[in-house]
Amino acid sequence: MQVTEIPFVKLIGIEQEKNNLSLRFDSKILNHIKTIHASAQFTLAETQSGLFLQELFPDLEKKVIPVLRDSQIKFKKPAVEMITAYSKVSEDIIIKFKEQFTRKNRGTIQIEVDIKDINGLLTSQAVFTWFIQKI
């Protein structure tokens, strides 16, 4: 699935460049203090975590249903320029998920996402827990 084709993602203007998603500073996604709205940053981070899942487990595409189970986000600094999301997960977590999925045909995995502006300023950090079940 092309994540930038998800209707809501498309609506707010998330763009993909290689393995990262970005959101341009645009009046349509600003809040009352003229910074990028918290919900737009959340959507960017959540979508990035889903894209990262596709990259981690390409062999599972069209064989599983991934559903967001839990999320946590902390807003660090106002986002006043274009922002980009970066995902990461430890190798231990990947191994644990693979073992769980192999045993039960389902599992959970946590993806961490940092959002930074074009100057490298960290605007928010998030953790997304995905539940993934074999179809």
Image (tube, grey):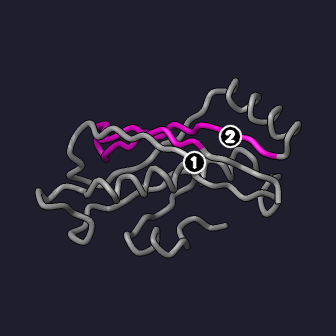
Q: Which mark is residue 23?
A: none
**Is 2 contained in the magenta span?**
no
Q: Residue at x 33, y 57 (%)?
A: 39
Residue bounds of the magenta highlight: 106-129
Counting other residues with Cα less than 10 Å from the Cα at mark 2, is it few (<14), some (14-19), or many (20 or more)?
many
Q: Is residue 124 above or below residue 132?
A: above
Report how many numbered discs are placed on residues in the image. 2
Q: At which x and y percent is residue 70?
A: 52, 44
Q: Residue at x 65, y 38 (%)?
A: 109
**Residue for badge 2:** 108
> CB atoms at circles 2 and 1 under 8 Å apart?
yes
**Is 120 contained in the magenta span?**
yes
**Residue for badge 1:** 69
- SS for callout 1: strand
66, 111: nearer the viewer: 66
88, 128: nearer the viewer: 128
Q: Which is nearer the N-term, disc 2 or disc 1?
A: 1
Examine the residues drawn in magenta and state their main secondary structure: strand
Which amino acid type corresponds to the residue marked 1 in the rendered image?
Arg
Q: At which x and y percent is residue 64?
A: 77, 57
Name the image quarter holding the N terminus.
bottom right
Q: Is residue 70 left or right of residue 101?
A: left
Pick out the residue farthest to the left.
33
Q: At which x and y percent is residue 20?
A: 51, 51
- SS for callout 2: strand
Q: Is residue 43 above or below residue 113?
A: below
Pick out the residue farthest to the top.
92
